[in-house]
Image: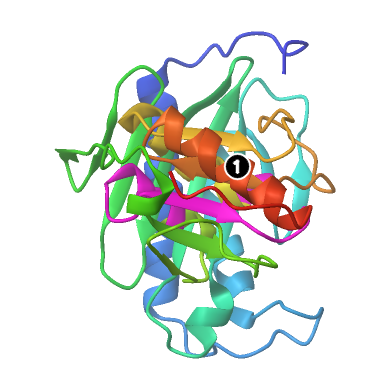
Amino acid sequence: MSSKKPSSQPPVEIADLVERAADAVVGALDGCADWGASGLRVGQYASDLVADAAAHAVLDEAGVGVLSEESGLVRPGADVVVVIDPLDGSTNASRSVSWWATSVCAFDADGPVAAVVHDLVHGRRYRAVRGGGASCDGEAIAPSGVREPSEAMVGISGLPPRALGWRQFRALGAAALDLCAVADGRLDAYVDCSPDAHGVWDYAGAWLVCQEAGASVVDAHGRDLSVLDHSARRTPVAAATAQLCAAMNANRARAFATGPIATG
């Protein structure tokens, strides 16, 4: 990201653009009649395309760069690049499993600057601006403060070869919402147990929400999460505290190496 020049737009204008893109997706999906497969590629749904088109209508008019799961990267040299997952959890949506969202996150030369993750089932809206804190529906949020795996309720994506020392776990199916649940304390941690399964659009918005709420987020293999490449994949691990994040990541590594699992 350091090769890009600083954005000429102040954060409040970027945050407003992110809000408008999320609003456009919410409005478009309110009228969506087809939640089945798109027929264009495996794992893509007609609703993904409806949501993507709605977000692009706002972002293209603004002239910013856009990196979307559905339509790739356009205007990569722009000062601001908006990373979107138009419909995170689209398989859940297609089967009426109530956990899916849209995630919109603007990046400037220094990384994520403003984000919205909108829970499309329950109507919750998570917002974050770099240096400005994080909120849900206008109320400030904070993680649980849990420090030990043995006390933690953990969201997972994919299946680890062994339990990771948690108290309980949940597999919910939408990374953006899973990470936001860490930010607001409903989950204590989140561990991606799939090998490099997530693009930046899956975690970017919720990553900023977590950071601004005070939660810790890392890549399981120590790589930079701030990557604007449609082909790049990462393995996010998040937790309420740095201690819990480090412990869960260590337990993940031990599990995949078939070693012992710590519980404290």
Nearer to me, 252 or 15: 252
The kind of residue tagged 1 is: Asn
Q: Is residue 22 above or below residue 54?
A: above
- Colour theme: rainbow
Residue drawn at x 32%, y 51% as measured from the top left: 151
Q: Residue furthest left?
A: 139
Residue 198 among those drawn in magenta: yes
Q: Is residue 100 above or below residue 256?
A: below
Residue drawn at x 27%, y 37% as measured from the top left: 145
> As drawn, is 203 to the left or to the right of 153?
right
Q: Is residue 87 above or below residue 104?
A: below
Range shown magenta? 178-201
Crowdedness of circle 1 by 10 Å Cα count: few (<14), some, many (20+)?
A: many
What residue sits right under mark 1 in the picture? 249
Q: Quadrant of residue 123?
A: bottom left
Nearer to me, 197 or 130: 197
Q: Quarter of the image containing the C terminus?
A: top left
